Image: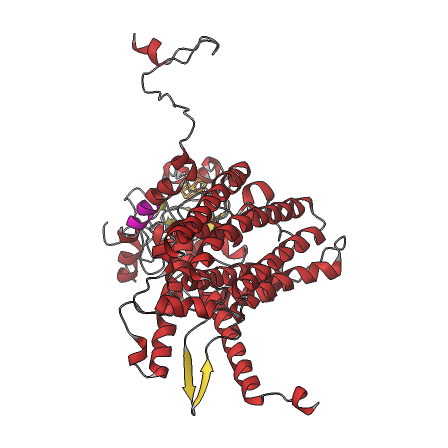
Amino acid sequence: MQTLKSSPPSGDRGMQALTNRSKILERKPMTFLESIYLWNILKGMMITFSHIFKKQPTIHYPEQTRPFSPVFRGLHVLNRDEEGRERCTACGLCAVACPAEAITMEAAERLPGEENLYREEKYAARYEINMLRCIFCGLCEEACPKDAIYLSETFTPASFTRESFIYGKKDLLIPDPVTKPAEFAAAKGIKN
Amino acid sequence: MTTLLAIDWALFTEKLILIVIIVFASLGIALYMTYGERKVAGILQDRPGPNRAGPFGIFQPFADGLKLIMKEEIIPNTSNKALFVLGPGLAMTAALMTCAVVPWGDHLEIFGRKVALQIADINVGILYVFAVVSVGVYGIMIGGWASNNKFSLLAALRGASQAISYELAMGLSLIAVLMTTGTLQLGEIVKQQMAPGHLWNIAYQPLAFIIFLVCAFAECNRTPFDLPEAESELNQGYHQEYSSMKLGFYLFSEYINMFISSAIMSTLFFGGYDVPFLNESLLSPNVAALVGIIALMAKIVFFIFLFMWVRWTVPRFRYDQLMNLGWKKLVPLALANMLITGAVILLWFNK
Ligand code: SF4
Ligand code: SF4
């Protein structure tokens, strides 16, 4: 009877151990040498000393960065289509989906002659994400019917003022693939 | 009358220069010990430690010091103001005073004049060290009491009782050493250990050294005996109410204490400025002195590393364990060591 052997003595409200992994502590009084502690301290010091020669796992941050997984949810980008037009149609679904209420926007109607700028007839004249509210859950990305918003593999840089954490369209929009292909590729990342 | 008042100006300036050098060297070393501590802590824990301020972070202590100086100086209005200011000053003074009797090297010969590298080779050297170390306890006591904060007060009480308990074992362990050396004069103790055919005192008194070492940890309030600063129980310990440079003085005096006790341990047990297997009398006195200082510094650095190494290995003792260890283990051991030493001297060497 394994469980019986490892279960604590009676008076323990009849609790039975669920596994046999529990370890019984022996509470012998310390011998004189143990009570001087020196030997055990010496053993501990040997362990810490061996750590001098261990490899440090530190990543020296600004110089080195940690590789992100391809599904990392970082800073948002507002996407453009192949012709460089903004995809967002200001439907507000992302703002509704956002559990942190970090997104606000103002819609505007596309005027004639702006077809090369906006893909849909309605577009976001103002689109703001408060990065201090955002919890980077990615629900906006999932809610968007137009593939307009994506979470990239970078994170929000540190700043000194609260205002600078409210990212507007000029911070979020990806560079135009037609007029600035190099920046577009850089923003997309080499992996994609 | 005139002869009584005559001052040996050369001696006076020589000692003054020596004092200034030693005080500033102690401060500088303590400054870099804070850096060393953080580096050692980092490396023992598989991380790099401070490495941003300058190459390898070597300007870190200045950044820390600057930070402390720039902080607001707060004196709580319920505190005893005079004593509140006196506390850190006393801790710092007591820490620095001990270096007066440590022989830092043999003598230099400058323009045919012998300049001893020791501020005062008084014949009660060790007793002086003990006396000054005991005064250091007042720094903690006064600081903790004057803050008018119950945590500080508790920490100060702990510090005082801990220091007194461990001073006892320390003194007893030293009596055994003094029986073999037959002198209290630190310069003389080093000279004995340097004499050919004579080993370092550690070879004759290993047990005394171990007891002394443990007690030195307790006297310097270093982990595992840093109960006066036990953050988990006492918030911060006796310097809870202190800020700015007054706090800096307390933290600093701890490092100076560590430096001085390393120096005392090297002097008493490890031959001071003696280089093993080297006959210093063959070298010219200035070279010998320089080699000696380097040797002593190497020993001190080793002990300082030991202090840090232990700190980052062993967790803090419980208070009853501390008292048990002090009174029930170390004091009897030291007494036994003393009696055995006495018996051996009496029976074998004193016929
Ligand atoms: S990632 Fe989540 S929290 Fe951030 S804006 Fe999108 S939906 Fe809101
Ligand atoms: S980003 Fe997508 S979901 Fe949000 S408003 Fe634009 S189109 Fe709608």
Which of the 4 image quarters holds residue B202?
bottom left
User: Measured from the top left, where is residue A158 in percent x and y?
Assistant: 45, 56
User: Measured from the top left, where is residue A148 in percent x and y?
Assistant: 36, 45
User: Measured from the top left, where is residue B132 in percent x and y?
Assistant: 59, 62
Q: Is residue A169 above or below residue A93?
A: below
Question: For the magenta stretch, what is the residue range?
Answer: A45-51
Judge by depth and name the residue closer to the eye, B229 or B285: B285
Can the viewer see residue A102? Answer: no
Judge by depth and name the residue closer to the eye, A22 or B320: B320
The structure residue drawn at horizontal position 36% and vertical position 47%, both measured from the top left corner, is A87
The structure residue drawn at horizontal position 47% and vertical position 51%, both measured from the top left corner, is B173
Q: Colour scheme in the image?
A: secondary structure
Q: Is residue B55 above or below residue B326?
A: below
Instruction: Give the total number of marks visible in the rendering.
Output: 0
- Report whether A180 appears left or right of B332: left
Judge by depth and name the residue closer to the eye, A38 or A24: A38
Judge by depth and name the residue closer to the eye, B215 or A182: B215
Q: Is residue B146 magenta?
A: no
User: Measured from the top left, where is residue A101 in percent x and y?
Assistant: 51, 40
The chief SS type of the magenta part is helix
Q: Residue furthest front?
A: B351
Q: Is residue B83 above or below residue A145?
A: below
The structure residue drawn at horizontal position 72% and vertical position 55%, both measured from the top left corner, is B76
Q: Quadrant of ligand 1?
A: top left
Q: Is residue A46 magenta?
A: yes
Can the viewer see residue B293? Answer: yes
Q: Is residue B266 above or below residue B320?
A: below
Which of the 4 image quarters holds residue B249?
bottom right
Quadrant showing the N terminus of chain A: top left
